[in-house]
Amino acid sequence: MPARPPEKAGSAGSAGKLSAKRCPICGKPALEAAKPFCSDRCRDVDLNRWLSGTYAIPGKPDADEDAD
């Protein structure tokens, strides 16, 4: 029996399937269409947190170029 080809990530059949991972915002099962989130709403909440500065990646402070 020939093997079935894997479904493409953007195919219509996989758009609503649940993933084993959980949404990092609300904890519901993630959907393939909004991966790694469960919905567009949670994706937008995450984007807003990045844009508003709630999330930040720590780094070394820059040396002040004007300080002499």
Image: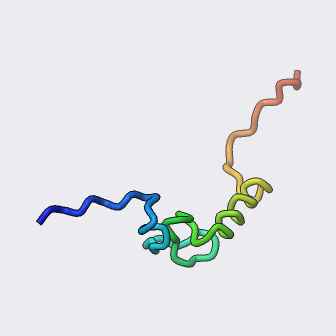
Residue sitting at x 69%, y 40%:
60
- Residue 47 position, x and y percent, is 70, 58
**Image-quadrant location for residue 48:** bottom right
Determine the residue located farthest toward the bottom in the rendered image: 28
Q: Residue at x 59, y 69 (%)?
A: 24
For the image, the number of numbered tags is: 0
Would you identify the image quadrant in which residue 25 lies? bottom right
Does residue 25 lie above or below 59 as drawn?
A: below
Quadrant housing the N terminus:
bottom left
Q: Which residue appears at 18% of the width and 62% of the height? A: 3
Residue 12 lies, in percent from the top left, at 45, 65
Question: Is 14 situated left or right of 62 in this image?
Answer: left
- Residue drawn at (68%, 48%) of the image: 58
Tell me the quarter of the picture where residue 40 sits: bottom right
Nearer to us in this view, 54 or 20: 20
Residue 42 at what x, y percent from top left? 66, 69
- Identify the image quadrant of the C terminus: top right
The one nearer the camera, 7 or 38, is 7
* Residue at the farthest left position: 1
Q: What is the x, y in percent for residue 44?
A: 70, 63
The furthest residue to the top: 68
Q: Residue furthest front?
A: 12
Q: Nearer the viewer, residue 55 or 60?
A: 55
Instruction: Decide if residue 1 is on the left or right side of residue 66.
Output: left
Left or right of 5 on screen, residue 18: right
